[in-house]
Image (cartoon, rainbow, N blue to C red):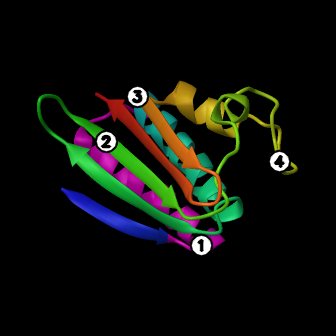
Amino acid sequence: MSESLDIRSSDDVVRVRQRVRAVAVEAGLGLVDQTKIVTAASELARNTLDYGGGGRVNIELVTAPRRGLRLEFVDQGPGIKDVDVALRDGFTTGKGLGLGLGGAKRLSSEFHIESTPGQGTRVHITRWK
């Protein structure tokens, strides 16, 4: 099962959270793991909107070789100049606490980010059962 949702407004961020929770339940994730993946998805959806100018999330229920939830956030915004710096706690280009990307990484079983200045950002996260 795979689906894609646009992220163009704050309402879309809420929809992403709701859909990720529903698919996490379907994947059989426990409450703690559901909360972790929903929190990470919320942060990445907000970043996609606020810093990437909007984009989309691809949601995939993974059933083999084990169960889990894989998410891919994609935008075509300005990109991230230095990903290693952006992953450090406390780094922000906005008004937040600078815990977003690093926090999403810690909440995920797997995390991968690709970003090219001037071309956008792609973040893959997975939470396994």
Give the distance between the C-alpha atoms of the residues marked 1 and 3, in whole angstroms: 27 Å
- Disc 2 marks which residue? 69
Please state which of the two labelled residues, at mark 3 or mark 4, is closer to the viewer. 4
The kind of residue on which mark 2 rests is Leu
Please state which of the two labelled residues, at mark 4 or mark 1, is closer to the viewer. 4
Residue 12 appears in which quarter of the rendering? bottom right
Task: Specify start and end residues of the magenta stretch as a single range.
Answer: 7-31
Give the distance between the C-alpha atoms of the residues marked 4 and 1, in whole angstroms: 23 Å
The kind of residue on which mark 4 rests is Thr
Looking at the picture, does residue 80 appear above or below residue 28?
below
Give the distance between the C-alpha atoms of the residues marked 3 and 2, in whole angstroms: 10 Å
- Disc 3 marks which residue? 110
Looking at the picture, does residue 86 appear above or below residue 23?
above
Task: Give the quadrant of the C terminus.
Answer: top left
The earlier-in-sequence mark between 2 and 4 is 2
- Disc 4 marks which residue? 93
* Viewer-side residue, 102 vs 122: 122
The earlier-in-sequence mark between 1 and 2 is 1
Q: Position of residue 108 (x, y in %)?
A: 46, 30
- Disc 1 marks which residue? 11
Give the distance between the C-alpha atoms of the residues marked 1 and 2, in whole angstroms: 22 Å
The earlier-in-sequence mark between 4 and 1 is 1
Does 71 sit left or right of 38 as displayed? left
Q: Kindly indicate whether the residue at mark 4 contacts the one at mark 2 (C-beta within 8 angstroms).
A: no
Residue 8: say if magenta.
yes
Does 72 sit left or right of 79 as displayed? left
The kind of residue on which mark 3 rests is Glu
Residue 111: say if magenta.
no
Q: Position of residue 92 (x, y in %)?
A: 81, 41
Look at the magenta stretch and give its main secondary structure. Answer: helix
Q: Kindly indicate whether the residue at mark 2 contacts the one at mark 3 (C-beta within 8 angstroms).
A: no
